[in-house]
Image (cartoon, rainbow, N blue to C red):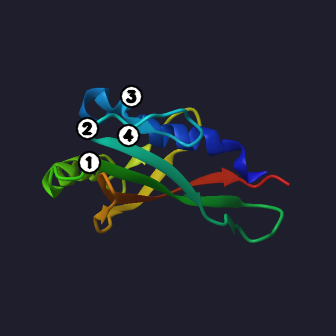
Amino acid sequence: MTNRYTKETLQALNNKLMTLDSGIWSTKTSFPGSNFTPPDNAPWLKVDYLFSKPVLIGAFSDAGTYREMGIYQVMVYVPKGNGMFEALDIVDKILGLFQRGSELTGSGPTVKIERSYRSSPMSEATWMKIPISVDFWWYVPYRS
């Protein structure tokens, strides 16, 4: 199966994000499946993982390597009324962590960062948020 390295890949991405500002975001980040209560009147992050269909690379269907791909989505939340510049400062720091061509290593395969980019700010009742997308990929051996 091609998903046996998924946990290690996501952990490498999470570990890189947690290096932001010397790790102060570890208690201010919502990860999928975790119990999390956003802080009152303070910035926080929300992480999601979006996966794509793997691509088999090789001359034959029973040999070769899979290229697994996905988007590591980080949403930056700041209290509404604090202005956009606080959020943009955080966004720029995160984009700096996941620069095009960088590689993340851990207990699984090397994760390659294809690109990272931000989208337009969005407004909710009490929060302003800016999404960041990090396109990433990694190779895993084909296994039937």
Question: Which of the two labelled residues, at mark 3 and mark 2, occupies the earlier sequence position?
Answer: 3
| Amino acid at the residue labelled 4 | Leu
Distance from Cα at disc 4 to Cα at disc 2: 18 Å
Q: Is residue 42 shown above or below 139?
A: above
Distance from Cα at disc 1 to Cα at disc 4: 17 Å
* Residue 17, disc: 4
Question: Which of the two labelled residues, at mark 1 and mark 4, occupies the earlier sequence position?
Answer: 4
Horizontal placement of 15 versus 138: left or right? left
Distance from Cα at disc 3 to Cα at disc 2: 12 Å
Number of numbered discs: 4
Viewer-side residue, 89 vs 60: 89
Question: Which of the two labelled residues, at mark 1 and mark 3, occupies the earlier sequence position?
Answer: 3
| Amino acid at the residue labelled 1 | Val
Q: Image point 37% across, 62% down: which residue?
A: 115
Q: Is residue 35 shown above or below 2?
A: above
**Foreground tag (4 vs 2):** 2
Question: Which of the two labelled residues, at mark 1 and mark 2, occupies the earlier sequence position?
Answer: 2
Q: Is residue 82 shown above or below 50?
A: above
The image shows residue 135 at horizontal and vertical percentages of 45, 61
Is disc 3 surrounded by few (<14), some (14 to 19) or many (20+) residues within 10 Å? some
Question: Which of the two labelled residues, at mark 4 and mark 3, occupies the earlier sequence position?
Answer: 4
Asked if the residues shown at circle 3 and circle 2 are in contact, with their CB atoms under 8 angstroms apart, the answer is no
* Residue 27, disc: 3
Q: Which residue is mark 1?
A: 78
Looking at the rendered structure, the secondary structure element under dot 2 is loop
Q: Residue furthest front?
A: 125
The image shows residue 99 at horizontal and vertical percentages of 31, 54
* Residue 42, disc: 2
Q: Residue furthest bottom?
A: 59
